Image (cartoon, rainbow, N blue to C red):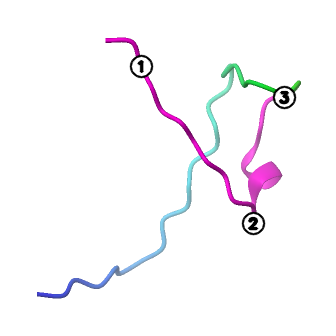
Amino acid sequence: MTTRYAGKVNAPEFPAGIDWINIDRPLTKSDVAGKLMILDFWTYC
């Protein structure tokens, strides 16, 4: 069974107040538009 993706979903803006590593200001979607971005999600268990 093949399912086709029926639409386009835009990514939300980054939440305000996030601490970024190796950058002196918060990122926005327009800062990373058209660029490859690797996100590393981790948590303490």
Q: In front: 23, or 7?
A: 23
Label 3, on which residue? Answer: 23
Alpha carbon distance from label 1 to label 3: 21 Å
Tell me, yes or no, whether the two marked residues, 1 and 3, touch with CB atoms within 8 Å.
no
Task: Establish if 26 lies above or below 36.
Answer: above
Task: Establish if 20 lies above or below 44.
Answer: below
Which residue is farthest top?
A: 45
State which tag comes first along the sequence, 1 or 3.
3
Label 1, on which residue? Answer: 43
Q: In front: 23, or 25?
A: 23
The N terminus appears in which quarter of the rendering? bottom left
The residue at the point 76 percent across, 43 percent down is 28
* Residue 3, x across and y down, in percent: 22, 83
Alpha carbon distance from label 2 to label 1: 28 Å
Q: Which residues are magenta?
A: 26-45
The residue at the point 42 percent across, 77 percent down is 7
Q: Quarter of the image holding residue 25?
A: top right
Left-right relation of 1 to 40 = left
Q: Which circle, 2 or 1, is nearer the viewer?
A: 1
Label 2, on which residue? Answer: 34
The residue at the point 56 percent across, 54 percent down is 11
Q: In front: 9, or 37?
A: 37
The residue at the point 64 percent across, 37 percent down is 14
* Residue 34, x across and y down, in percent: 75, 66
Is 3 inside the magenta-drawn segment? no
Query: Disc 3 marks which amino acid?
Result: Ile
Query: Disc 2 marks which amino acid?
Result: Gly
Is 42 inside the magenta-drawn segment? yes
* Residue 37, x across and y down, in percent: 66, 52
State which tag comes first along the sequence, 2 or 3.
3
Query: Disc 1 marks which amino acid?
Result: Thr
SS at circle 2: loop
